[in-house]
Image (cartoon, rainbow, N blue to C red):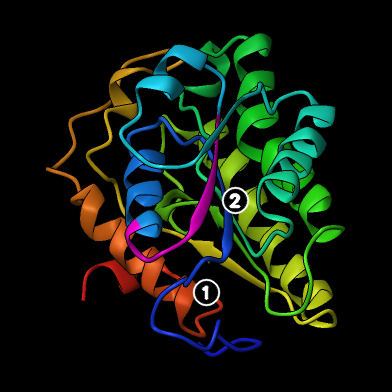
Amino acid sequence: MTGVGGLGRADLDGRSVLVAGATGGLGSVIAADLARRGGRLTLVARDGDRLAALDVPGHRVALDLRDPHACERAVAAATRHTGRLDVVVNAVGVVAFGPVDQLSVDVMEELFLTNTFVPIMLARASLAAMSEGGVIVNLSGVIAERAQPGMAAYGASKAAVRSFDQALAREARRRGIRVIDARPPHTETGLADRPLAGRAPAMPTGADPARVATIIGEAIVGDCADLPSEAFVR
């Protein structure tokens, strides 16, 4: 699906890139891919020690983006570092398993705070700093397309992101900013082994994070405006 227009080059060539969730199983691989493409990265994560140990070049900022003001600070850090903001990738996320009546209210609140409100607040902060040609990427995942029992609350938190991205894409188009909703299949990031609650069901071997990151990187430098799950199985 063609969008507002690509960055107009085969790589990022010094463009300013903010990666949120940069120490995660997928965020770290996406960050490495975008660094190889020539992006000037600002890397954001909660854990300062893990951020310092990350083997990806870039300006490091330890922030808990669940605080809405932290999203604004992340954007400000990226613009101070490079003088501009061209690309934002949100790879922050948590998961929980189990029937919804077995999940605590605290777990459900955490699912929506992290998976839904962080991308909304980060996109909101980013729009004010981006100019024409900017790109915002949110990872809603295949669960946003195919609801699964035992993952109702998690799936709802991700489906909300997909709905947000669809509407935001139309709003941002007026400014020449592209919004990509990425819905990769289950990927071997280790997230399913660190749930907020419950236990992951038996799953087939997931996708290779490096391949998922490459497809997302290609979409950013190209003119893609949507990455459905089938885009990752070509």
Q: Label 2, on which residue?
A: 159
Residue at image location 41% in from the left, 30% down from the top: 23
Q: Residue furthest left?
A: 205
Q: Quadrant of residue 26?
A: top left
The residue carrying pointer 2 sits among few (fewer than 14), some (14 to 19) or many (20 or more) residues within 10 Å by Cα, namely: many
Who comes first in sequence, dot 2 or dot 1? 2
Residue 228 in view, yes or no: yes
Give the vertical position of 214 relative to 156 (above or below). Answer: below
Q: Label 1, on which residue?
A: 226
Residue nearest the viewer, comparing 12 with 150: 12
Residue at image location 29% in from the left, 58% down from the top: 212
The residue carrying pointer 1 sits among few (fewer than 14), some (14 to 19) or many (20 or more) residues within 10 Å by Cα, namely: many
Q: Are marks 2 and 1 in contact (CB under 8 Å)?
A: no
* Left or right, 56 with reference to 133: left
Query: The residue tagged with tag 2: helix, strand or loop?
Result: helix
Circle number at residue 112: none
39 part of magenta stretch: yes
Give how far across and how far down residue 165 sits, in percent: 68, 62
Query: The residue tagged with tag 1: helix, strand or loop?
Result: loop
| Magenta-drawn segment | 36-44
Q: Quadrant of residue 27?
A: top left
Q: Quadrant of residue 233?
A: bottom left
Query: Of the residues shown, which amino acid type is indicated by label 1?
Result: Asp
Residue at image location 55% in from the left, 63% down from the top: 181
* Left or right, 103 with reference to 199: right
Give how far across and how far down residue 166 sits, in percent: 69, 68
Residue at image location 22% in from the left, 39% down from the top: 188
81 part of magenta stretch: no
For discs 2 and 1, the disc positioned in front in the rendered view: 1
